[in-house]
Amino acid sequence: MSPFIKNHRWHFYFWIVQLLGWGGLVFIAYAFTPDMDGYKGSKLFYYGLIATFGIGIFATSILRSFLKRILNFDAFDSRQLLKIFTGIVIAALIYFGLSYGFGYFSGKYSEEHVKVPDMYKDFGIGLLLINSLITIMGWTVFYMSVKIAAKLNANRLERAELNSTLKQAQLNTLKGQINPHFMFNSLNNIRGLMLEDVEKSRDMLTKLSEMLRYSLTKNNINAISLEEELEMVDNYIALSKIQFEDRLDFIKEIDKGTLGFQIPPMIIQLLVENATKHGISNLKSGGTIKLIAEKTEHTLCIKVINTGKLMIAHNSTQLGLKNIKQRLRLLYGVKASFLLKEVNEEVVATINIPLS
């Protein structure tokens, strides 16, 4: 929303509250004024209520204009408090002076011979002045409370927008790390086969182009369906099998009810790639990669299990694993989890993604 529209909206709300507030005060004055000696039914009384309404709006509008110029919540200090109190006193004097002047002259020159009740005669100038000060101070407290609440809400929205922008920037950075990592491994495989088998190399390039097209088109979104991700994984496995041949066995156990669930793009592919690179490639006889996707009560559970031992080299950047953890944290907070462990000579990577 543009600043102009926002300011226009707040200006409209101010006048609505201003009119309703002073209108309510006048109504209370009317309701609780005793009808003594015909005073409440006189024109003088009604004119007095109208004057109170107009004078109140006039005095507090001047005070509002003054407060808008001096208030700075980002650098609030004692000098601003003094200015606020000065503004309250001036507005109270305006309110008192106009009210007293109207009452004096209307009572003196009114053609109505209305006896003013004794309860009003007992009000001295000092008491009327204190009443004016209390009224304006009450208005100021309410106005300041609304301004502070609006400022806090604006700060909250600004922080939320900033956090969202920062989070999206971090996600884009993480997704940008995927393509170089994936491309390096795939191009390295193609280079090894280029002189041995041209047909296989051409096939690998076709698979690689399909995967790159997929990764580029999905790079600007944070979630895709599990079914789409599995298609990419199948391409990756087909690409890897040209290199590993019978040394790589791939098994999928996918609950069909999970195919439509949304997950971060390329997150399973990273796990499968990690299992291939650090698991199967280190075994002379090869091994098995099993992909499991199932729904629990509140989460989508994804497991990638590969034959081998959990061994992380000291000089390894663990880029893929860090990427997964950070993306899950940014997208789901503490509701998602990632665990990597070794169980019975198998490495088990488990991701739990909340369903809501």
Image: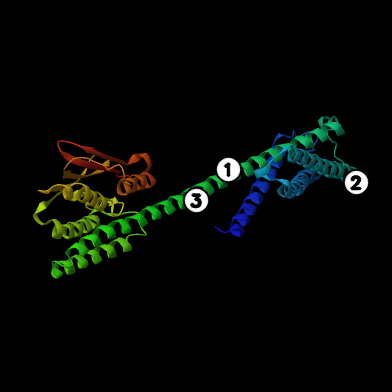
- The answer to whether 121 appears left or right of 302 in the picture is right
Which numbered circle lies on residue 101? none
Pick whichever, 180 or 262, lies toward us. Answer: 180
Mark pair 3, 2: CA separation: 62 Å
Which numbered circle lies on residue 152? 1
Labels 1, 2: front one: 1
Q: Secondary structure at mark 3?
A: helix
Question: Taking 31 as reference, is 248 above or below it?
Answer: below
Which numbered circle lies on residue 161? 3
Instruction: Say if residue 70 shows up in the picture.
Output: yes
- The answer to whether 201 appears left or right of 43 in the picture is left
In the image, what residue occupies the spot 14% across and 47% down? 283
Q: Report x, y in % for residue 103.
A: 85, 42
Picture quarter containing residue 181?
bottom left
- The answer to whether 215 appears left or right of 158 in the picture is left
Labels 3, 2: front one: 3
Question: Taking 198 as reference, is 45 above or below it?
Answer: above
Picture quarter containing residue 177?
bottom left
The mark that comes first in sequence, 3 or 2, is 2
